[in-house]
Image: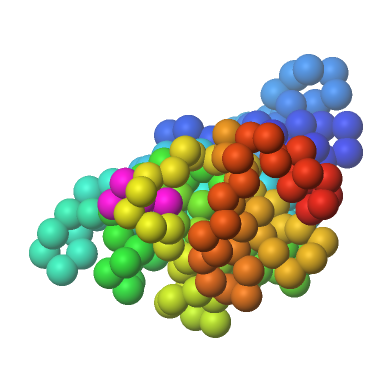
């Protein structure tokens, strides 16, 4: 859900769909095409407002042929504030990551944020393991972050977080029923058990 003045944009699910609801509770038929913005194929699981007033949805598209094999790929869709494809972000407003090989088989995108500098954070399961992606504002992987634009966790699976958020300090917090922290673009093995969660939240501003 994203607020636009007195209107509300709801987005997600099949075909990266989004609709806008006016303050009177009716569907805004001027939004998108006939009241609906969508991008064929795939499912969106997260949406945020973009600095230019537009919208960004993140999710995955399955059964994409890459190197002769089918994979799930990370898919990002950008709409203008009025639900039109934002072609400045990519063809039809779409970017899909098919390389390097480490980005393939993405499922269950569960976190999406845009940093103050316009870079994009996406948290997802890849090969059933948690990965934090950082992308440039145009949708390219930020290769200065982690390894090839990704911070990977150890083989032990983590609980899927409810959200991710940049902190006021140099760290990034990934939060679910547990909290983990990346610092200096690398994984920090520090784990904050439940009894320390309040102190972590308070110190990071979450």
Q: Foreground residue, 70 or 116?
A: 116
| Residue 167 is covered by the magenta coloring | no
Give the quarter of the figure containing the C terminus.
Answer: top right
Q: Is residue 200 left or right of residue 159?
A: right
Residue 85, how many percent across, how many down? Answer: 57, 55
Residue at the far left in the pictured view: 68
Look at the picture and state if 176 lies above or below 102: above
Q: Residue at x 57, y 57 (%)?
A: 190
Residue at the far top in the pictured view: 25
Residue 129, how many percent across, how many down? Answer: 35, 50
Q: Residue at x 74, y 69 (%)?
A: 170
Residue at the far front in the pictured view: 195
In the rendered image, is residue 76 in sight?
yes
Q: Residue at x 75, y 19 (%)?
A: 26
Which image quadrant for residue 137?
bottom right
Kindly report the secondary structure that dominates the magenta region of the rendered protein. strand
Give the quarter of the figure containing the N terminus.
Answer: top right
Give the magenta range: 126-130
Residue 58, how many percent across, how many down? Answer: 52, 49
Look at the picture and state if 137 lies above or below 40: below
Residue 180, how many percent across, how many down? Answer: 58, 52
Q: Residue at x 82, y 61 (%)?
A: 168
Q: Foreground residue, 77 or 197?
A: 197
Q: Is residue 14 left or right of residue 98?
A: right
């Amino acid at each position: 859900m994203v607020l636009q003045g007195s209107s509300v944009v709801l987005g997600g699910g099949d075909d990266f769909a989004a609709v806008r609801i006016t303050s009177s509770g009716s569907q805004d038929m001027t939004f998108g095409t006939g009241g609906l913005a969508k991008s064929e194929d795939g499912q969106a699981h997260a949406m945020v407002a973009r600095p230019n007033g537009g919208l960004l949805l993140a999710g995955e598209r399955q059964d994409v042929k890459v190197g002769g094999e089918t994979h799930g790929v990370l898919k990002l869709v950008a709409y203008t504030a009025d639900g039109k494809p934002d072609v400045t972000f990519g063809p039809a407003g779409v970017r899909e990551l098919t390389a390097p090989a480490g980005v393939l088989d993405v499922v269950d995108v569960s976190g999406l944020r845009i940093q103050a500098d316009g870079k994009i954070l996406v948290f997802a399961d890849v090969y059933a393991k948690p990965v934090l992606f950082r992308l440039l504002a145009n949708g390219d992987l930020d290769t200065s972050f982690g390894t090839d634009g990704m911070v990977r966790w150890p083989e032990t699976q983590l609980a899927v977080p409810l959200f991710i958020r940049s902190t006021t300090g140099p760290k990034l917090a990934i939060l679910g029923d547990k909290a983990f922290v990346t610092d200096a673009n690398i994984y920090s093995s520090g784990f904050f058990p439940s009894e320390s969660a309040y102190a972590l939240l308070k110190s990071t501003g979450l």
